[in-house]
Amino acid sequence: MSKSKREKGVEMIKEVYCGDVPVAEEGQDAFMDFMLGSLFGELWANDVLTIEQRRLLLLGAIAAQGEEMTFTIQSRSAMKRGELDFQQMEEVVRFITQYVGYPRGSKMKMALGGLKKEFDKQ
């Protein structure tokens, strides 16, 4: 029997976020059920772009919005999965700051600094 979009989505969110993002049981959260099926079960799961390519696009979109919490989550996962190392993440922040502006870029730099401390402890 083939997997449902939600089941595929659960597998994909665990892969994308290294198991760091909690997933509600099916039926407990309609928003999460929809997100798992559509965003992760379809979009992240298709093979048109790699996870790494999607992550870079997402890092840019998140930085443009100034969302340092989400930037931290994405950066942590990228480094855990070996997609990008800390030096590459610093370059992402330097590069993207030129397009999103220094106030937003500075928030991403601070978020990355917090991640460095976290990874240095490991």
Image (spheres, helix red, strand yellow):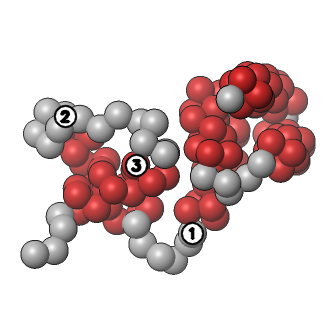
**In this rendering, position of residue 112 left or right of residue 54:** right
Taking the spot 56% from the left edge, 72% from the top edge, the residue there is 49
Q: Amino acid at mark 3?
A: Lys
> 60 or 46: nearer the eye?
46
Give the alpha-carbon distance from disc 3 to disc 1, as whole Å.
15 Å
Crowd band around label 1 with a 10 angstrom C-alpha radius: few (<14), some (14–19), many (20+) = few
Give me the disc on residue 50.
Answer: 1
Q: Earlier in the sequence, mark 3 or mark 1?
A: 3
Taking the spot 42% from the left edge, 72% from the top edge, the residue there is 46
Tag in front: 3 or 2: 3
Q: Amino acid at mark 1?
A: Thr
Taking the spot 49% from the left edge, 45% from the top edge, the residue there is 17
Asked which secondary structure carries label 2, the reply is loop
**Vertical placement of residue 102 versus 19, above or below:** above
Taking the spot 63% from the left edge, 38% from the top edge, the residue there is 76
Where, by quadrant of the figure, is residue 121 drawn?
Answer: top right
Give me the disc on residue 14.
Answer: 3
Q: Amino acid at mark 2?
A: Asp
**In this rendering, position of residue 114 left or right of residue 45:** right
Give the alpha-carbon distance from disc 1 to disc 2, as whole Å.
28 Å
